[in-house]
Amino acid sequence: MRTPLSAALRRLVLGSAVALAAGALPGSAEAQLRDEYHQAPRDTVAQEVYDGWKQYNLNCARCHGEDVIGTTIAPHLLVSLKPNGPINTKESFVQVVCAGRPDKGMPSWCALGMDPPTIEKLYAYVKARSDAKMSAGRPARREG
Ligand code: HEC
């Protein structure tokens, strides 16, 4: 037996489902939202880039900015890694991240125990962002 309350609830649920369907644009970023609080990743990336994204967020984002968008604390790495920027090779990136510039506030990551493969993953992520090959936010990991 249906009570008046459950009927009202049913109308409410059906009503919002219809409103959602009407609001969604097919094929658009909006249609890819899982729901309004949990957005789907915009990019699917190789394991190396995914690991780099994770390591960046653990170790670098607090100074260089979430999603590498820059801060007033540390250089804007998307600019540093441009072809005409000061860190325009993988070698120079690995070198400065390993050695750091402790007197200027950039930690020495090798001294802190970071290994070269991790620095190369960081490079893969920051370079992909600098080359505009991926957008801000959490990427999805390509399988296989
Ligand atoms: C405590 C803050 C801090 C953290 C954490 C930090 N950095 Fe830095 N980083 C700096 C500062 C400050 C500079 C600029 C030093 C200078 O004035 O030369 C810098 C410089 C750099 C540069 C050279 C940029 C250029 O244009 O010369 C690179 C590359 C870099 N950081 C990468 C990283 C990576 C990758 C991580 C994470 C593993 C990281 N940083 C974590 C503060 C930080």
Image (tube, grey):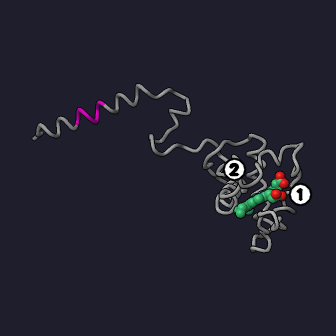
Answer above or below: position of 111 versus 125: below
Dot 2 beta carbon under 8 Å from ligand 1:
no
Q: Residue at the location (71% across, 50% down)?
A: 72
Task: Say few, some or many: other residues with alpha carbon within 10 Å of mark 1 (under 14 / 14 to 19 / 20 or more).
Answer: few
Q: Which residue carries the number 1 mark? A: 92
Q: In the picture provided, is 81 more to the left or to the right than 59?
A: right
Q: Residue at the location (65% across, 46% down)?
A: 44
Answer above or below: position of 12 versus 138: above
Q: In the picture provided, is 51 more to the left or to the right than 97?
A: left
Dot 1 beta carbon under 8 Å from ligand 1:
yes
Q: Which residue carries the number 2 mark? A: 71
Kind of residue at badge 1? Ser
**Circle 1 sits in a helix, a strand or a loop, which is it?**
helix
Kind of residue at badge 2? Thr
Cα distance in 3D space between marks 1 and 2: 21 Å
The label nearer to you, 1 versus 2, is 2
Magenta stretch: give its range. 10-15
